[in-house]
Image (spheres, rainbow, N blue to C red):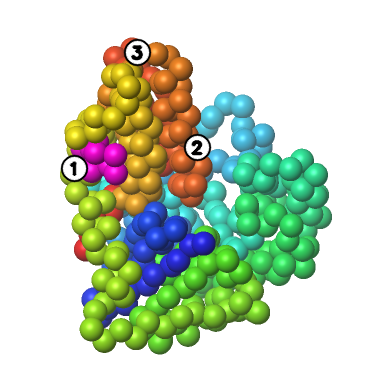
Amino acid sequence: MKQMIVQCQQQMTQMALLEEGRLVEYAAELPRKRGILGSFFKARVVNVLPGMQAAFVDIGQRKNAFLYVDDVLHAHLDKQPELKPSISELLKVGQEIVVQVLKEAVGSKGARVTTHFSLPGRWIVYMPRADYVAVSKKIEREGERARLKAMGEQLRTGEEGVIIRTVSEEMSREAIENDLNQLRQQWKAIQRKAAEHSAPCELHRDLSIVQRLIRDVFTPEQDELIIDSEEQAKEAEILLRQISPEKAHVRIFRGAEETIFKAYGIHEQLERDFARKVWLQGGGYIIIDHTEALTVIDVNTGKFTGGSNLEETVTRTNIEAAEEIARLVRVRDIGGIIIIDFIDMEQEENRREVSSVLESRLKKDRTKSYVVGWTRLGLLEMTRKKVREEKTIL
């Protein structure tokens, strides 16, 4: 069972997702500084760079956004021209276009935007111009995949595209069709606003962190939602009724002596999980260091001395570290290149076991990651999609 704990304070809303009491996701949002990932803007082209095959566009933020040529071409690869045109053939300075934020501004870089639009719903992701249907790879049964694919093809019209999400497994046609119709209305509203306003202007912003987590990971029949604000609880129940009318219940925390995060032990977990040095239950520890280009994670045996020989001791520590690293990159939302320096192992089968454990634990993560493999120096390389600044405790 998952517990979604929401702490609402005047200056900030924080969310912690617990699985069996352990923190697996954390997010914080300042009311006046909501992220723009997934938001739609009407933008003005301010610079076209043929040498980079990209353009910079003004979306009304502090920094201009970056638009690469591939994000201007058709979203369906089969419908793109065989010879890629120059960006200068597609865009002109002063031109106004609708774009969606693909990646938030990070450091000195502005946001990355695209014209491959997508609107996430509870059961599907709607892509108004993609012209294809895809089914989540996490739905493994071939019969169910075929049913959902056929349903998507029947429901979409014209150039519409649909991605069937993992939670749609065994869902009825009616539920998925209702989701699709709501997303179609959102897209029409975006188009209307774009027609009525000049660039730069915001056309649509994604849900708040609480609403996004309810939409994306919450299962009312199994999970528990606890909020310390009656106002936020009412908003959450409205969204829950759309997902599961019979189970649209939110528990309200009314503790007067301590905050909800304190009561559920989240403060202590955050302090531990965001430290540079994180101890493992078996006595080993990991060190997490960040550079501008990548994140380096070092594994050490520490106080762990168990095992009948050195290879067994090292392997057991590395396996425990792999499990913890998969959780921590999710909690801290670490993105980009990640290099893990596990303790040296002599046997190839032990290295395979460690990488296999890491890969299996990463499957629980909603953000896409890829374990590249072992380098000749015995380091394990992986990447994780980076769409926001890495989280810190606010």
Q: Residue 284 magenta-drawn? A: yes
Is 106 on the left or on the right of 38, as rendered? left
Q: Which mark is residue 277?
A: 1
Near mark 2 (Cα within 10 A), the count class, few <14, some 14-19 or many ≥20, is few
Q: Position of residue 138 (x, y in %)?
A: 62, 44
> Who comes first in sequence, dot 3 or dot 1?
1
Q: Residue at x 26, y 51 (%)?
A: 273
> Who comes first in sequence, dot 3 or dot 2?
3
Is 13 on the left or on the right of 97, as rendered? left
Magenta part of the protein: which range? Answer: 279-288
Residue 140, can we see it? yes
Which residue was labeled with disc 2? 360
User: Which quadrant of the figure contains the C terminus?
Assistant: bottom left
Q: Residue 15 magenta-drawn? A: no
Q: Residue at x 75, y 51 (%)?
A: 148
> Who comes first in sequence, dot 2 or dot 1?
1
Which residue was labeled with disc 3? 346
**Type of the residue with mark 3:** Glu
Q: How far apart are labels 3 and 1 at the CA level? A: 26 Å
Q: Position of residue 210 (x, y in %)?
A: 43, 70
Circles 3, 1 touching at the beta carbon (< 8 Å): no
Q: Residue at x 70, y 54 (%)?
A: 169
